Amino acid sequence: MLALASLSGAADAAWARAGAEFADLALLGGLAVDDASRAAAHDLVARGREEFLPDDPLDFVDAELAALADAPIRAGLNVRSATVDPIREVAAVCARHDAVVEVNAHCRQAELCAVGCGETLLRDTPRLRRYVAAASETGATVSVKVRAEVDGVDLPATARRVANAGADVIHVDAMDSEAVVADVAAAAPDSFVLANNGVRDRKTTWEYLAYGADGVSVGRPSDDPAVLRRVARAVDDWARRRADDGRTLEREREGEREEEREVPG
């Protein structure tokens, strides 16, 4: 799988459609959905960052997902919240659209962290688990975006706990610790592991897939068709290679079975 990772203030329905030729999933957002996170997002805008700040976040989610109803790509929505109820409400909208809701435990901007959003959730696993459980109860497919290299956080252990709470997808920003993807995949074997950071070409794509990721996501260059084309081709080539390896292994096993049948008892 190739996913388009959320980009604050830029990842909307039009952005998703532009990448639909290459990707399987587009994660819109991130979107601040409660009062505290929205106040933090206003502070981010004041210092020059782009943010989605619609008057009604739920209406925004519904409209953006509806705009992708006929698009050849599955949609999702990355959400930030300092409280659990808005997560549940957004997840219910996502469920109606067969979209993924992604809990943001990833952003490291000081304004968001100060109100308890983003990567601060990685240090508060019980609250993160409540977010995931609330989203899962709506019937939505639930992803959790996490970050490696956060001091004091055992990421594989956190992945295991959120998977047990109902996370279908663990979306890992590996930072400069690519091998952590293997540890997360081992810790949460029943969740789909999506690897992120520096995915640009065959080499970077295959590195993450070799570590056990089920798919990769492209962030900043997600609006660059040349990058998306390279990564999509790499994902497809990896899948074909694995299929070829599987067929070769099955032929070898069938040969062994034939030999065993030919040996007199």
Image (cartoon, rainbow, N blue to C red):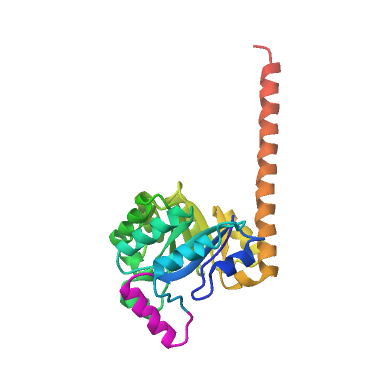
Quadrant of the drawing holding the N terminus? bottom right
Most foreground residue, 6 or 127: 6
| Above/below status of 197 relative to 44 | above
Judged left or right of residue 128, residue 26 is right
Q: Mainly helix, strand or loop, the magenta region?
A: helix
Q: Count numbered badges in the picture.
A: 0
Residue 179 in view here: no
- Percent across and percent down for residue 74 are 55, 56
Verify whether residue 210 appears in magenta.
no
Name the residue at 52% across, 58% down. 194
- Percent across and percent down for residue 25 are 56, 58
Name the residue at 36% across, 49% down. 164
Residue ranking furthest to the bottom: 47
| Above/below status of 262 relative to 189 | above
Verify whether residue 35 appears in magenta.
yes
- Percent across and percent down for residue 178 are 53, 63
* Residue 246 sits in quarter: top right
Most foreground residue, 219 or 34: 34
Name the residue at 40% across, 75% down. 55
- Percent across and percent down for residue 107 are 42, 72
Judged left or right of residue 222, residue 58 is left
Judged left or right of residue 71, residue 117 is left
Residue 233 in view here: yes
Range drawn in magenta: 33-50
